[in-house]
Image (cartoon, helix red, strand yellow):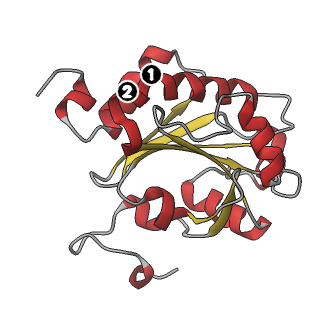
Amino acid sequence: MTESTFARKGSRLLISDRFANVPLINHFGQAVRFRDDLVNGRAMIINTMYTNCDGTCPGTSARLQQLRDDLSPLFGRKLVIVSISIDPAEDSPRVLREYAAGFDADMPRADRCEWHFLTGAVAAIEELRRSLGFYDLDPKVDADRTRHAAMLQFGNPNADRWAALPSALRKPLLLEAIRRVCGFTFEQRYGIPG
C-alpha cells in the first residue's frame, strides 16, 4: 500500500488510515468493510479470537462483555467492539453467532454499543490482523494460532488516539484507559461533567 492510498485528514495520515479496509462478514451474516463500516466516526475496542480456543479467548470475550455493559451508557452507539476470528476456516457467521450468544452479543440491542464478531477470507483476515499489529515478530510463534496475545486495542479515530493493553488487566484500569483514549467528550474521558 502506498501513502496515496490512505485517506487523509487535512495533510496528516491517521493511524486508522493504515488499517486494511478488507471485506468481512459479521456474525449476523452482513457484509462489511473494516474501515468504511466499522472505524468511521466511532471509538473502537478491537481484539482477535477464535471460537474453539481453550486459552484466553473466552476470558477476553467475558471481559469485553463487562466493558460493554459499563461503557454503553456513556458511549452509546459512538463505541463499537470488534472481535476478529483468526480461524476463518472454522468460524463461519453461524458459529460466531452461537459463540456471541454466550456473551449476550448475538442480537443487536439499542441499550448497548454494537459488538461485531468478524470472519472472512483467510487472506483478508491476515491482511487486517497485520495492519492492526496483532502479530508476533517470530514467524513460528505467529503461525501458532494458540499463542496469540490476549490484547485489546482501542482508540478514537477522530482524535487519532490509540492504545493497547492486556485483556486480563484489572477492569477498573482498563475502563479508565479506554475512557481516556476513546472518549469524545471531557465527561467520557475523565468522568467529570463538562
Q: Which residue is mark 2?
A: 73
Rendered residue at 83%/45% (across/down): 95
Disc 1: which residue? 70
Residue nearer the viewer, 177 or 28: 28
Q: Amino acid at mark 2?
A: Pro
Quarter occupied by the C terminus: top left
Q: Does residue 26 appear in this view?
A: yes
Q: x and y percent of residue 102 in the render?
A: 74, 28
Give how far apart the Cα atoms at labels 2 and 1 are.
Answer: 7 Å
Disc 2 versus disc 1: nearer the observer: 2
Query: Which element is circle 1 on?
Result: helix
| Left or right of 54, for residue 65 | left
Residue 140 appears in the rendering: no
Q: Nearer the viewer, residue 46 or 135?
A: 46
Q: Which residue does the image show at 60% across and 21% down from the upper left?
A: 168
Question: Looking at the image, which residue is at 73% across and 51% down?
Answer: 138
Using the image as rendered, state which of residue 159 and residue 1 is in the foreground. Answer: 159
Q: Locate residue 63, reporting x and y percent.
A: 60, 24
> How many discs mark residues in the rendered view?
2
**Residue 12 location, quadrant:** bottom left
Can you give x and y, in whole percent of width and height, for residue 86 in the image?
76, 51
Q: Return the residue nearer the eye: 165 or 98.
A: 98
Asked whether the beta carbons under mark 2 and mark 1 sit within 8 Å of each other, the answer is: yes
Farthest residue, direction front: 110
Q: Which quarter of the picture shows residue 111?
A: top left
Percent x, y of residue 144: 84, 47
Q: Quadrant of residue 44?
A: top left
Residue 187 disc label: none
Above or below residue 165? Residue 23 is below
Residue pictured at 83% horizontal, 39% vertical = 146
